Image: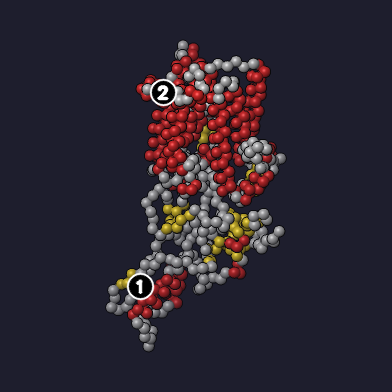
Amino acid sequence: MPSRKFADGEVVRGRWPGSSLYYEVEILSHDSNSQLYTVKYKDGTELELKENDIKPLTSFRQRKGGSTSSSPSRRRGSRSRSRSRSPGRLPKGARRSASASHQADIKEARREVEVKLTPLVLKPFGNSISRYNGEPEHIERNDVPRKNTQEKFNLSQESSYISTQYRLRPRREEIRLKEMDSKEEKFVTKELAVRTFEVTPIQAKDLEFGGVPGVFLIMFGLPVFLFLLLLMCKQKDPSLLNFPPPLPALYELWETRVFGVYLLWFLIQALFYLLPVGKVVEGMPLIDGRRLKYRLNGFYAFILTFAVIGTCLFQGVEFHYVYRHFLQFALAATVFCVVLSVYLYMRSLKAPRKDLSPASSGNAVYDFFIGRELNPRIGTFDLKYFCELRPGLIGWEAVLTTMDIIHDGFGFMLAFGDLVWVPFIYSFQAFYLVSHPNEVSWPMASLMIVLKLCGYIIFRGANSQKNAFRKNPSDPKLSHLKTIHTSTGKNLLVSGWWGFVRHPNYLGDLIMALAWSLPCGFNHILPYFYVVYFTMLLVHREARDEYQCKKKYGVAWEKYCQRVPYRIFPYIY
């Protein structure tokens, strides 16, 4: 095993990612497997660097003049005091041509305007921390700003982090020299172009769901596929051999009264959401350090919803109306989802950069799908949080640490999923059984209930353990759990449910999905579409999780994967 060159606590110079600039850093730790050093800059930023990107202090010498000031104007002033002549005035007895004088002036000007670029202070974006492993970062430096949706962060002398800067090779600064017409002497003025750092959104190679073509196909294909599934369910023989089913006329699917009932349901749930009951908690830190507040009153909304339904039943309201107009309700929800998605995209165009989702790309089609704005709110009414938990799925409160909330924006993907896909696909087995009843024996029913409870215990236990650890890692109740420290300052759980598989909550979800489908029997494969789809969804979601965690935690995540090799299914996957 190769020996390490730098010791913990040693103060050295570390190269800033993507540049030739070195800054004073402190060695925090060293990983013997990856041979990466975790270092801490003066502004608190922690990165992982290769050994050849770290130099001892003795390897550097100050710039000529010995000043450690970061202000270019002060350095220029110091130099101007050391010069006694105008750049255009020849020393007595000296002879040189106008061309030679001009070239000498340009060289002198270049030496004078050599200024130090203040480093960009990286902050967590969404909930991620950048790590540097010697490869190029996705940061562009442009001298000329471009008109697009990417925000530029202008760096100036007034930046919050200033320190003495060193480099191993010269930087090339853009200089514009203006010659002033003067009979007395030439005056050369210097001007530096303003440098900007562009925090580049996801590049084309990083776009998910197949990029723009993929999301375009999903947005048009999923609604069509949903209606085909529902139509198949209503057939006397829902065999795949009878696919596709007869298609009704479009006017038969639209009913204004149904759309009004759907809006009424949405508004009632919004009213319950606004009730000042239930505790208020803080979400995960945003890019600017803020924590949004969320009111957890889903249980009260659930009770009130049951009270409203009970009252309606007592008054003689026939809820068979919902089943008879199931396709019309699906179309009403789809239309509402499209209108909401258009509104969300249009309002996101005016949102500040700090409020945008880390998943946004700058492409209009992709951002319409994935969502540009991370947490769109009307006052205190959080649109994404509400749609995730109320109109289509009530009671799922352990959601604030999920990818939906902390990473994905609110666009067509989540709007369609929350308002259309979840309520009409998650109830698919019940919709199937109305037209195709299946008798289940008591022993089989008991087995299904046990299977459902096992899945729920795994799902609930894993999520509760994760949320409790994120909320208070030093909780005595969690002291028995083993962890791996990361360069972000946080720890990864490597025991308990999260030492069993890397995504135990997904395992519990899939077990429950199977338990919900078993009552439909085995005459047709159609009711098991939910299990097949859900498996594909969670495997894809797990891949997204893995990518984000590896990007965020780096070497620590690789260690976790070695300790817990299985992703979802023990000994299988």
Q: Name the residue nearer the viewer: 446 or 248.
A: 248
Q: Residue at x 58, y 43 (%)?
A: 546
Question: Image quadrant for the C terminus?
Answer: top right
Q: Position of residue 58 (x, y in %)?
A: 61, 69
- Left or right of 69? Residue 452 is right
Which label sits on residue 4?
none
Closer to the camera in the image, 157 or 258: 258
- Residue 40 image offset from top left, x and y in percent: 59, 56
Q: Is residue 290 left or right of residue 378?
A: right
Is residue 123 at least partly visible in the picture?
yes
Asked if residue 160 is positioned above or below residue 109 in the image, the reply reads above
The number of callouts visible is 2
| Residue 6 lies in quadrant | bottom right
Residue 12 x %, y %: 61, 63
Residue at 53% in and 66% down: 167
Counting from the top left corner in percent of width and height, residue 325 is at 43, 19
The answer to whether residue 81 is above or below residue 543 is below
Q: Amino acid at mark 2?
A: Leu
Pointer 2 residue: 247
For disc 1, the marked residue is: 188
Mark 2 or mark 1, which is nearer the start of the sequence?
1
Residue 475 visible, this angle: no
| Spatial separation of the CA atoms under disc 1 and disc 2 | 78 Å
Residue found at x 67% / y 42%: 564
In contact (CB < 8 Å): disc 1 and disc 2: no
Q: Residue furthest front?
A: 241
Q: Observer-nearest residue: 56 or 515?
A: 515
Task: Identify the element where label 1 is drawn.
Answer: strand
Q: Amino acid at mark 1?
A: Val
Q: Residues within 10 Å of mark 1 (few under 14, many from 20)?
A: some
Occupied quadrant, residue 41: bottom right
